[in-house]
Image (tube, helix red, strand yellow):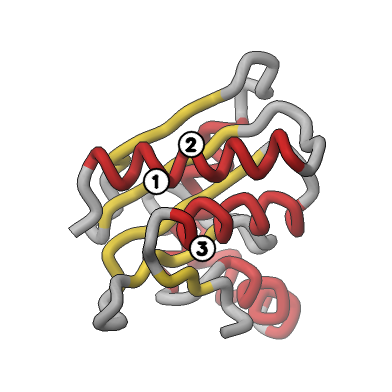
Amino acid sequence: MLGLEKANAIVREALAHARGIGAPPMTVAVLDARGCIVAMNMEDGSGIMRGDIARAKAWGALGMGSGSRSFVAKANNHPAFFTAMTAIATHGIVPVPGGVLVRNADGATIGAVGVSGADPDRDEACCVAGILKGGFIAVTGEN
């Protein structure tokens, strides 16, 4: 289970990583396996849409069962499918890196993290750092 304490730790570690790599103000959303927000933090100066984008990255990862990095090729190869998925997804799907599944030691998906604020690769790196330092397994779409 991905409870509040662990979700907050993921947020803290993701933001610490962002500060360490000199990223602009970031937003981190941590969702449980049901897609409910457990923790979200927007740094001062983070753009007003960053919360929606971070949540959509995480939501899409949960809904598609893979990190959002894998969506890039899927969106390019099947644009009609991705357009339909985006239209029906309650909280959106963003086909760029920055949405990462969280799995426990048994390999069960227990949630997802979405980050927005920098370029997609740095957003994803912040997700992964937060998840790994939280003691979980990160699934980006490449692994």
Q: At x 78% / y 37%, what residue is drawn?
A: 23
Which numbered disc flags the more N-terminal residue, 2 or 3?
2
Mark 1, other Cα within 10 Å: few <14 / some 14–19 / many ≥20: many
Which numbered dot is residue 12? 2
Disc 3, SS:
strand
**Eye-nearest disc, 2 or 3:** 2
**Depth check, front residue: 63 or 22:** 22
Which numbered disc flags the more N-terminal residue, 2 or 1?
2
Which amino acid type is shown beneath numbered disc 2?
A: Arg
Extreme residue toward the top, this view: 44
Instruction: Name the quadrant containing residue 73.
Output: bottom right
Alpha carbon separation for disc pair 2 and 1: 11 Å
- Quadrant of the drawing holding the C terminus: bottom right
* Residues marked 3 and 1 touching at CB (< 8 Å): no
Query: Is 91 on the left or on the right of 73, as rendered?
Result: left
Disc 2, SS:
helix
Which numbered dot is residue 100? 3
Alpha carbon separation for disc pair 2 and 3: 16 Å
Q: At x 62% / y 50%, what residue is drawn?
A: 126
**Depth check, front residue: 64 or 105:** 105
Alpha carbon separation for disc pair 3 and 1: 10 Å
Mark 2, other Cα within 10 Å: few <14 / some 14–19 / many ≥20: some
**Depth check, front residue: 31 or 102:** 102
Query: Is 95 on the left or on the right of 58, as rendered?
Result: right
Give above or below for 16 relative to 106. above
Which amino acid type is shown beneath numbered disc 1?
A: Val
Which numbered disc flags the more N-terminal residue, 3 or 1?
1
Query: Is 38 on the left or on the right of 68, as rendered?
Result: left
Residue 6: x and y, percent? 30, 47
Which amino acid type is shown beneath numbered disc 3?
A: Val
What residue is pinned by disc 1? 30
